[in-house]
Image (cartoon, rainbow, N blue to C red):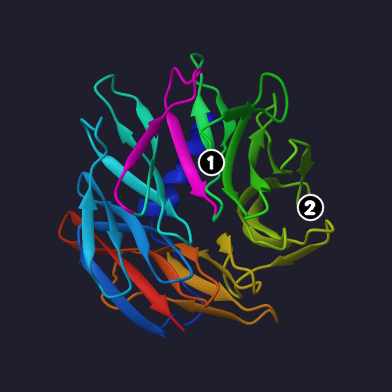
Amino acid sequence: MANSWNGKLCCLCIALVPFGLAWPVEANGTFTILPAGTLAYSINDNGAVTGQSDSSGFLRTPDGTITSFRAPGDVLGTVGVSINADDAIAGHYIGADGLAHGFVRSPDGTFTEFAVKRAAGGTYPQCITAPGVVVGYYFDAARLAHGFVRAPDGAITAFSVRHKTETRAMCANDAGEAVGTWTDRSGALHGFVRDPQGAITPFDAPGNGYTWGFGINNQGDVTGYYETVGEHGYIRLSDGTFTLFDVPGSQATEPVAINSSGETAGIVSRNGFIREPDGTITPFKAPGANSGTYPAGINSSGAIVGTFYVRSGNRYTPYGFIRTP
């Protein structure tokens, strides 16, 4: 299932396989388009954005100022993956050893680099919380993925849901609860929630499909999708209750983020969508997008950040975007 997982990660950013659409998709909302070559991954409640531009990470402040940066040990590229309320950024860079190393970039631009000791195959931070906790995953010498939590003081705790299985932590909330996906020995995928003390609760969406865990909000509500025939969205409340949903007319509904109001953002058949707490779903695409619109994050105001692609001949050019309600 490793190849299946890697394909899913790629589809969030660069999937270009056409799907038929059975519903209208509009460029609704107000869009701010970032420069060509940018991929936008995370937005905080102040509207600051981080991501990647060519081989550099970037910070875009709410006034539109873009600051590019590269980690000190970077040889082959730096990626800003997540930004917290203080504009601290977590991400990874590729070092001289050819491996991914984690970093935290403080609001003043200072870098703290780190790697999980057992990460023979690289360290990949995925999220930084307001208190400065970083979660993500690393690969061991056998290329198996394991989760990690890095405390603000730099202490790193590695973890796996089950022995000799794969675990990827994808997001965390300000209370220190982490969500992600683990792969059992048969290759089946399941979600999990890990509490701040390290207790792990595996879960599966109803229907016995493979379950992906991607986003968690400060109430402990989780979102992601499960696979049966196609992909279907879910919200799992902190009490374990599930709400299952699809964008009408589609068999490819893939939520990736949830905010504290319960708004969910995701991908539907190569376009974006936002789902309100009352269940209203609005599909959208970025203006000018002709090869996909891929949301990656949502803040407490409902502003969505992501990347869209413009195809010209055989060339696909990415543009980051911010969609405000």
Asked whether the viewer can see residue 27, the reply is no
Rendered residue at 55%/22% (across/down): 144
Residue 207, numbered label = 2
Amino acid found under the numbered disc labelled 1: Pro
Q: Is residue 123 magenta?
A: yes
Q: Whole-percent x and y of residue 206?
A: 80, 54
Residue 126, numbered label = none
Rendered residue at 27%/54% (across/down): 58
Asked whether the viewer can see residue 221, the reply is yes
Q: Circle 2 sits in a helix, a strand or a loop, which is it?
A: loop
Q: Circle 1 sits in a helix, a strand or a loop, which is it?
A: loop
Judge left or right: residue 206 versus residue 59.
right
Q: Is residue 301 magenta?
A: no
Measured in 3D between alpha carbons, the distance from the residue under mark 2 to the one under mark 1, in whole angstroms, is 39 Å
State which tag comes first along the sequence, 2 or 1.
1
Q: Whole-percent x and y of residue 291?
A: 31, 64
Quadrant of the snapshot with the N terminus:
top right
Q: Nearer the viewer, mark 2 or mark 1?
A: 1
Tell me which corner region of the image, top left, top right, bottom left or bottom right, holds residue 317.
bottom left
Amino acid found under the numbered disc labelled 2: Gly
**Region in magenta:** 108-129
Q: Is residue 182 above or below residue 8?
A: above
Query: Mark 1 and mark 2 in contact (Cβ < 8 Å)?
Result: no
Q: Whole-percent x and y of residue 149?
A: 59, 36
Seen from the viewer's position, the closer of residues 289 and 21 is 289
Residue with the mark numbered 1: 152
Q: Is residue 159 above or below residue 233?
A: above
